[in-house]
Amino acid sequence: MAAILFLLLAWLSGTLLLQRTIGPFEFLNGPEKTLRLAGLWAAGLWAGLLPVTVMTYFLAALSARFFQQTYPLLLANVITLAELVLLLAFTSWPRWRSARRGWRKTIPLRQILSVQNWPAGTALTLGLAAASLALGSFLMWDSFVIEEGQLAAGYSIFGDFAPHTALVRSFAVGWNWPTGYPHFAGDGIHYHFLFYFLCGNLHYLGLPIDWAINLPSILSVMSVVILLALLARAITHQILAAILAPVLFFFRSSLALPLEIARQWQIDSEAVADVSVLARLGRVTQTLWELDHFIGTTPHDDWGLWTLNVYINQRHFLSGLAVLILLVLLLLPDLAKPASRWRTPVLDFMRTPSLWFSETKAELKSMCARQLVASLLFVCLPFWHGSVLVASLLILLTWWLFLSRRLVWTLAGLLALVSAVIQIRVFAGPGSEHSAVSIQWFWGFIAQDKSWAGIMLYLFLVTGLALPVGWVTALDLGRRARLLMAASTSLILFLFAISLTVDVTANHKFLMIALLLVSVPLAGALARLFKRRSVSALLLALVLTVVLTGTGLYETRLIHTINRNRLALSLESPVVHWILEQTPPRSIFLTAPYHYHAFFYSGRQAYYGHAYYAWSAGHDTAFRDALVKTLLASTEEDWPEVIELLEKQKIDYLLVDDELRNHPDFRVNESFFTAHFERAAEFPEQENTVIYDLRKRRDLS
C-alpha cells in the first residue's frame, strides 16, 4: 500500500540521516548498544517524517498553484516517493553489496533465537517497544475507530477531534491550498497542522481515516518511550530507570485520586452510617471503578487537562515530544563542566571567550553533525507543534551558559525563530503575527489564587510529590539531572508568567513537558532505592512508586470508561456523498456552527464552524459572527450588500438544516435565499437539509 511505503521510506531516510550524521548515539557513553540502536530508529522515525512531510506539503502547494487540473497530493507524492527511493538506493547500495558477501556463512536459527546470544539490553529494548506499542494501541483504538460504517470518537476526545478530522479530510479529499482552518475558511491557518497533513496524506494514499490518524499516533508513543528510556539511562546510568521514566511520565503524580477517595468516603459516610470499614471501602472502590468523568479539584480538571487524555486528543503532541527528547539528547554532549570546582559557568564564559568555538577538529565535526540535525528539526517544528518549539528554545536558553559551544546553538535558536516568523507569515498571512502569536504577561495561569502561596498549592494539587521529590533527588544524581530540573523550572515559570495565545489554558503543555524532564531524576532515585538490599529502602521505593503513579494509572481506567460512550458520524451520509460528487473540492460552505459533524467528512470548509476552535487559535471570530448573522437575516433591501459580501468572502454554498433553523444565535430568512439563489439539492430525511448554490443568483429587481 502506498501509505505504508511512504511511512517506511520516510522512516528509513530519517534513520539513515541520523546514522550518517550522529551515529547510534555513541556520544552518550553509557546506554547499551541495543538501546542506542533502538533510540536511533525511534528518533529516525521523526527525523524522517518531519522534513519529508514538510517537503510533501510544499510540493503539493506548488502543484495546487501551477497544475490546477491535477490533484495536488498526486504530483507531490510521486515526486517525494521517487526522491526517497533514489536517495535510499544511492546511499545504501554500496553497503548492501559489501554486506551481501558475508551472507554466505549462515547462522542457525536456534542460535539467533537463543537468549544467551542476545547483546546486552536486548530484552529491555524489546520489552519497552512491546509495552509502548500495546499502550499506544489501547489508547488510540479505544478512543477513535471506524465501526459499522460510522466514524466513532470517544466522549473524551470528540471535541478536539472536530478540527483534527476536518483537517485530515480537507487534505485527503478537499483542496486546502492555500491552507485554511476548515472551521473558519478564508482566513489562513494559525494552528500547527502539519501532523494532520501527514495523516491526510496517509489517508489519501489509501489508509482509512482511523488508521491514518492512529498509526502515526501509536508510533509516537513508541518513540517517546524508547527515547525517554535512552535519556534516563544516559543521565542516571541505571537500567531500571530506563523502565521507570516512561511509567512515571505517562502515569502522572497528583493529589486528584487521594482527594477523590476522601470525597467519596465522606459521601458514603453521610449516606450510610452503620457500615464496617471494609464494607465502606468496598463501596467506595466500586464507585471509583464505575466513575465516568474526570476527577480533580482545580479548574478544568473536568476536561482531563493533565491526564493521558491530552495525548489521545492532541495526537501531534506526542510526536513533538519525541523530537524534543531528541533535541535534549543532541545537547547533552555540549553541557560543559566548570573549569574547577569553585568556578561557575558564568565566570568561565566571561574569562574564556574560546568557549564559543570548538577546541579540536574532531569536536567541530561532531558539533556540526548534531547542529545539522537540530537545525533541520527546528525548521520543521513551528507548524508541527509550536509549544514544543517554544519549550525546546526555553531549554536551550536555560542551558546556554552551561554549553561549551554556545555560538552554534545560538545560531540554531535564531534559525528556529526566523523559521517560525516566516512560516507564520506564509500560513497565517502577512500582518497576522500578533493574532497568531499573542505574547503577553499573564501571571498565575488558571490558578484561582494567583499569589505565590496559591501557585505553590496549585502545583502541589496538580503534580503531587513529583516536583519536590524530583528536586531533592536531582541534587544527589549529578549535574545533568540538576540541569534537567533547572530546565523544568524554567518551563513552569514561563507557564505561570507568559501567555502566547488568547486562550491561556493552552499553556498546560509546558507543565506536561516539565514533568517529562522531571521523570528522569525521579526514575533514577527510585532505581537506586530498588537496588538497595534493605527492606526499608525497598518499602520506600514501592510506596513512592504507588504515590507517584497511582492517579495516572486510575485515570487510564477513567478514560476507558468515558470512551465507552462515543459520538458517531455516518460515513454513508447522502448529504456528504452529494457534496463530494457535485461540488468543487475547494468550495466554502456557510453552515450551522458545526463542531464534530459529518459535513467535514466531505473535505469542504465551513465559513463559520464552531467558534471556539478558531477563537483559541487567534482568529477574529467576533467580526465573522456579526457578519454571518447579518447575512443569514438578509432581506430584499440588502441584495447589493449580499452580493458584495459573497464575492469578497468567497462563499460558494449555503447549507440550511434544522440545526441552523433552530439555532438560538442565528435567524435565517430562508425565503430570501429561496427567491434569489438556486436550490442545488434537498434532503428531507437528513434534518430537512437544503443546499443553495450561492454562485447562481437571480436578481429579482
Image (cartoon, rainbow, N blue to C red):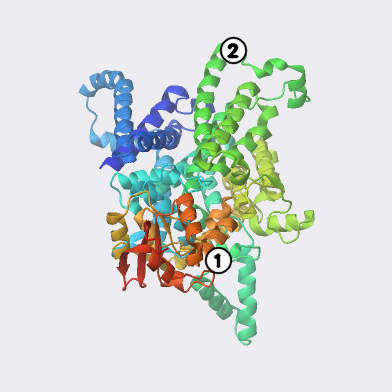
Figure quadrant of the N terminus:
top left
Q: Which marked residue is nearer to the observer: mark 1 or mark 2?
A: 1
**Disc 2 target residue:** 360
**How many angstroms separate mark 1 from mark 2 (CA)?**
55 Å
Residue 277 visible from this viewpoint: yes
Residue nearer the viewer, 151 or 457: 151
Residue 618 point in image, percent of width and height: 59, 50
Figure quadrant of the C terminus:
bottom left
Residue 540 point in image, percent of width and height: 63, 54
The mark found on residue 294 in the picture is 1
Vertical comparison of 72 with 296: above or below: above
Q: Is residue 208 left or right of residue 266?
A: left
Residue nearer the viewer, 191 or 537: 191
Disc 1 element: loop
Q: Is residue 450 left or right of residue 213?
A: right
Q: Is residue 120 left or right of residue 382?
A: left
Residue nearer the viewer, 273 or 166: 166
